[in-house]
Image: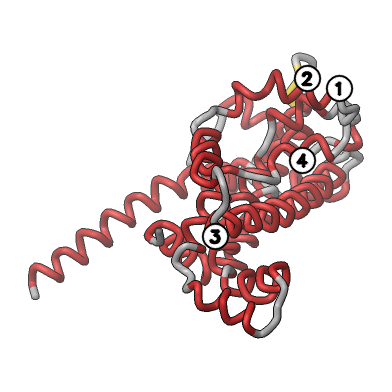
Amino acid sequence: MEYEKLKKTGLFIFFAIIATIILIPFYAIMIASFKPGQELIRKGLNLHLDFSMMSFDNYIYLFTGNHSYFTWFGNSILLTVVQVVLTLFISAAVAYGFAAYEFRAKNFLFICVLMIMMVPFEILLLPLYTLTFELGLMNTYSAIVLPGIANASTIFFFRQYLRGIPKEIIDAGRIDGATEYGIFLRLIIPVMKPSFAAMAILLGMNSWNNLLWPFMVLSDGSKYTLTIGLKTLLTPYGNNYDLLIAGSFFSIIPILALFFAFQKYFIDGMTAGAVKG
C-alpha cells in the first residue's frame, strides 16, 4: 500500500511539474498582453506581475481599433472548419477502404501511405507550389485546403481504429440491405466518434497554426489567415506589439474551445487508435 501511495504521489508530482512547464509560456503571454508595447520592447516577455504597468488598453484596441484582426480571425475559423471536416470525412473513407475491403495492391498502397508520413512537408513545397500555380489556384483558399484533405497520418490512425471494429457490424448492414455507402455513413461513422474527436483536435491545431503554406500561396490581404496577419505586424519600419501580443493570446481561445468540446472523447480515441491493429 505504501508503495502504491508513493507511486501515485511521484506521478502526481511529475505531471504537476510537466504541466507547470507547459503553462509558463501561457502565463508569460497573458501577462504581456496587458502591458504596453514599449514595456515589451524594453524588457521582453517575462513572468514579473506589475499591476502598475497593466491595463486593458491592448484589448480595447484589439476589439475597437482600425485593423484587420477580426477579418484574419474569421478567415482562420472558416479555413480550419472546412479543412478539418473534409479531412476527417475523406481520410475516414480511405481508411475504411483499407480496413474493411480486400483488393489488389492493398498492402502496397498502404505502404505508400506510410512512406508519405515519413516525407517532411518542406520537401514537397516546391512541387506543390508549381502544381498549384499551373492549376490556377494561387491566392485561393482551395490551394490551402486541397493538399491536406487526404492526410496520411489521419488515414493511418483511422485505419488502426477501424481494424478493431467487429466485421459483424458490416455484415449485419449488408444483410439488412444497406448499400456500401450506407454502411459507411450510418454504421461506421457513428462508431468512429471518439477517433473523430481526437483527430479533430490535432487537425484543428495544425490548420489554425499553419503559416508557411498559406503564406506562400496567399497574396490578398483580405484573405490572410490569422498567423499571416500577425506576422505582418512585425516589419522593419514598425512593430505593433500591443496588437500582436493581445491578438496572439486571444487566438488561443478557439483551440481551447475545440479541446474542451471534445475532451471526453480525446483519450478514448487516442488510446483505441494506438492499440487496435
- Tell me which amino acid carries mark 1: Glu
Q: Which of marks 3 and 2 is nearer the N terminus?
A: 2
The image's mark for residue 134 is 1
Quadrant hosting residue 120: top right
The image's mark for residue 130 is 2
Q: Distance between the residues labelled 3 and 1?
A: 35 Å
- Tell me which amino acid carries mark 3: Ala
Q: Earlier in the sequence, mark 3 or mark 4?
A: 4
Q: Are marks 1 and 2 in contact (CB under 8 Å)?
A: yes
- Tell me which amino acid carries mark 4: Leu
Q: Please name which of the two marks, 3 or 1, marks the residue nearer to the observer.
A: 1
Q: Where is residue 98 in the image (x, y as percent from the top left)?
A: 55, 54
The image's mark for residue 146 is 4
The residue singled out by tag 3 in the image is 198
Q: Where is residue 175 in the image (x, y as percent from the top left)?
A: 62, 82
- Quarter of the rendering occupied by the N terminus: bottom left
Q: Which of 196 and 170 is in front in this view?
A: 170
Q: Which of 86 and 18 is in front in this view?
A: 86
Q: For the point 46% across and 49% down, which residue is it?
A: 23
